[in-house]
């Protein structure tokens, strides 16, 4: 495995200064129902209310702002399951930089359309992030574009970590933070802040049962190939890269536990978040609530759950909240 690298608290504090005024400081809301369920205060970090509908804008903005003039001239390219692409497209447009987003055919149409609406060029390649990454690599080699990946980049991780700074300021008594996990950029950044500032805080990562790459890689003790599967938590799909230098090691060293939730629990959490919390979240944004409802986290104490994104297809959302037994694995 390649030598591991990390992102520091100072890196994240620097990122916060850089992106100030360009991203939204998202609020936290108390969930009375979830608080009663676990017998301790539960607060929801409403990151799905970010400008582009997910936390990804933070890292993308920080990374774009750190480009050299030569890199800005040649443009940026990235692979995405949707939310990173939207954030990167927005950040690039705001700074006048060309942006190409490569995606697999598994990415929902609403997320593809959302990226196009931000002015980026979208290329659909294959049926996995690895397939789409091949086109990214070609653009880097042939056109000199700069790759800004969804998670495996210090500026991306530092930008996502600004959520951790906000959580500590908004909920200083926090004891457990629950974070969705895909490639690990979000949880790595948040954990870097919390373990530096308040080491006793527990960091719990949550993924779906179908194709949870980081979970399987940690069990294997190294980055391994994990098949990407259809899931309600589509934003959590994709691998962590076999040459991972940052997030695998940061998750291993800083995160207290990784848990998985089923498709039915994710659907139930989407339904709960709408009916009870009055919030619209996508599957990836609901996994933390699903973990609490499934009692997957013992004695969490004062808890903050990061609702990471809200870019769900609204027809799918309607079916779920109306009680339909949605099985996207068969659609």
Image (spheres, rainbow, N blue to C red):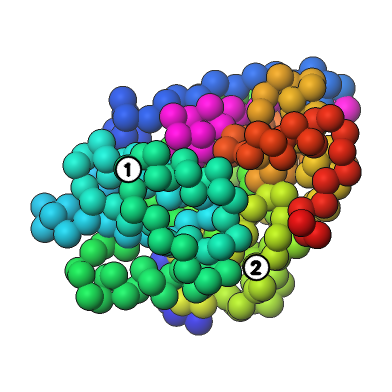
Q: Residues within 10 Å of mark 2 (few under 14, many from 20)?
A: many
| Figure quadrant of the C terminus | bottom right
Q: Closer to the camera: disc 2 or disc 1?
A: 1
Query: Which stretch did the figure color magenta?
Result: 37-59
> To which residue does mark 2 refer?
228
**218 part of magenta stretch:** no
- From the viewer's perspective, is 107 left or right of 327? left
- From the viewer's perspective, is 289 left or right of 265? left
Which mark sits nearer the N-terminus, 2 or 1?
Answer: 1
Residue 103, how many percent across, how many down? Answer: 48, 61
Residue 83, how many percent across, how many down? Answer: 50, 46
Name the residue located 27 percent from the left edge and 40 percent from the top edge: 93
> To which residue does mark 1 refer?
119
**Image height of 235 relative to 137, above or below:** above
- From the viewer's perspective, is 109 left or right of 12? right
Task: Tell me the element at label 2.
Answer: loop
């Amino acid at each position: 495995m390649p030598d591991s690298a990390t992102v520091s608290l100072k890196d994240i504090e620097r990122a916060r200064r850089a992106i100030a005024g360009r991203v939204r400081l998202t609020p936290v809301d108390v969930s009375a129902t979830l608080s009663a369920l676990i017998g301790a205060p539960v607060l929801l970090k409403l990151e799905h209310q970010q400008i582009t509908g997910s936390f990804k804008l933070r890292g993308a903005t920080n990374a774009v702002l750190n480009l050299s003039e030569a890199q800005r001239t040649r443009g940026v390219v990235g692979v995405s399951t949707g939310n990173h692409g939207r954030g990167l497209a927005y950040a690039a447009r705001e700074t006048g930089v060309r942006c190409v987003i490569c995606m697999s055919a598994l990415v929902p149409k609403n997320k593809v359309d959302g990226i196009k609406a931000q002015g980026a060029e979208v290329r659909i390649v294959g049926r996995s992030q690895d397939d789409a990454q091949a086109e990214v690599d070609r653009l880097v080699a042939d056109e000199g574009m700069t790759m800004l990946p969804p998670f495996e980049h210090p500026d991306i991780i530092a930008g996502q970590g600004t959520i951790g700074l906000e959580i500590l300021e908004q909920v200083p008594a926090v004891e457990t933070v629950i974070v969705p996990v895909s490639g690990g950029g979000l949880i790595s950044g948040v954990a870097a802040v919390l373990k530096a500032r308040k080491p006793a805080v527990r960091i719990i990562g949550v993924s779906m049962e179908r194709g949870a790459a980081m979970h399987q890689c940690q069990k294997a003790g190294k980055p391994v190939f994990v098949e990407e599967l259809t899931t309600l938590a589509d934003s959590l799909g994709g691998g962590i890269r076999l040459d991972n230098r940052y997030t695998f090691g940061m998750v291993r060293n800083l995160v207290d536990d990784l848990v998985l939730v089923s498709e039915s629990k994710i659907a139930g959490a989407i339904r709960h978040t709408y009916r009870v919390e009055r919030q619209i979240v996508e599957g990836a944004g609901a996994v933390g609530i699903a973990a609490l409802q499934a009692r997957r986290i013992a004695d969490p104490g004062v808890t903050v759950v990061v609702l990471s994104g809200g870019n769900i297809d609204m027809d799918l959302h309607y079916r779920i909240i109306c009680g339909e037994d949605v099985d996207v694995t068969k659609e």
